[in-house]
Amino acid sequence: MSRSQSSLQLSSGEISSLLKLFPKGIVAVDLETTGLSPLVDKIIEIAAVKIRPDAQIETFHSLINPLIDIPASTIQYHGLTNEDLKDAPTIKKPLKEFWEFVERYPLIAHNSSFDLGYLIKASHDFQINFPPLDVFDSCRWARAVYKNRPDSPGNFKLSTLSEHAQFDLLHHVAIEDTFACLKIMAKIAEIEIDQKTQMDKSFVFRLSQFDRNDCFNFSTRLKELPKLVQDKKLLSLEYKGSSIKESIRPVRPIGLMPLPKGPVLFAECLYTGMNKSFLLKKIKSFTPLEASYWKPGHL
């Protein structure tokens, strides 16, 4: 199977279920990238599946040359190397073609803040316009629907939800992951709940909220932060406006992301064990921590 083809398919029943949720149609999107930080890493693969209101299915796929070295730490997941991508186009043309494919349809992805973060940042960099669409998240929706249910999966990873929905997934192949996202949504739609109320919880943002430049830019005083995040260094943040008493927060970085409220460091807070978004403009200072420094209950 080539990366532009999927072994997964949508049945007529699944399409019908999805169109009850999105009667005007929907586009699922998935990316493969050089890392986990939309503000600094690059897209190397875009795939999308469109369901039109008349139940017709269309697909989009493009490999992309990132013009930077792809770290071995990410190759182990998606399997794409610089040699694989040397003849692929750079991002500008495929990105324009992607937005033309999307048209005015709402978008959905699994952990969509990450995928859309890359697409929005690249569009901003190349001054490519995108429509003011609503964005939904299948991970958030699964969490909302399965909360406190006895049939809840162990976690809400795409692979776990695929197994829970009883289909095989070739994970980290972008076109496969888009079909998986839609199949998971269709499976959840079968559950007898107030779908409208739960769907509201899956709404992430509207793309028009990213019109401001300050969604993407951060202070030069944080210029060392991207390298520390890329190297997955534990950090101690001096954070203004903390929701807990301590202003110093030990964190495990995940990525740097654009959000409508401003760019954030997405990280695991080692006090709470929860993933949090830390606004960069509220980070007063940061220092690396030795890995041996942090142990459960240390602080």
Image (cartoon, rainbow, N blue to C red):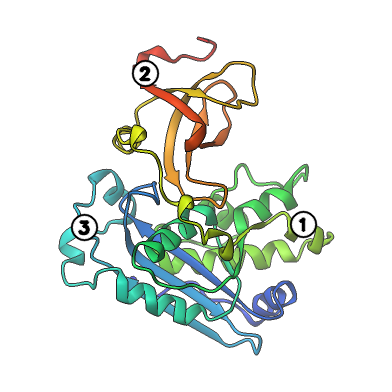
Residue drawn at (68%, 48%) of the image: 143
Q: Is residue 227 above or below residue 31?
A: above
Q: Which mark is residue 289?
A: 2
Task: Point out the image quarter for the N terminus.
Answer: bottom left
Number of marks in the rendered image: 3
Q: Count residues near mark 1 (Cα–Cα under 10 Å), then give few for <14, some for 14-19, many for 20+.
A: some
Q: Count residues near mark 2 (Cα–Cα under 10 Å), then give few for <14, some for 14-19, many for 20+.
A: some
Q: Identify the secondary structure beneath mark 1.
A: helix
Quick check: 117 left or right of 184? left
Q: Identify the secondary structure beneath mark 2.
A: loop
Question: Which residue corresponds to mark 1?
Answer: 198
Q: Which mark is residue 81?
A: 3
Q: Which mark is residue 1?
A: none
- Residue in front for this viewpoint, 96 or 107: 96
Of badges 3 and 2, nearer the viewer stands 2
Residue 207, by quadrant, is bottom right
Q: Identify the secondary structure beneath mark 3.
A: loop
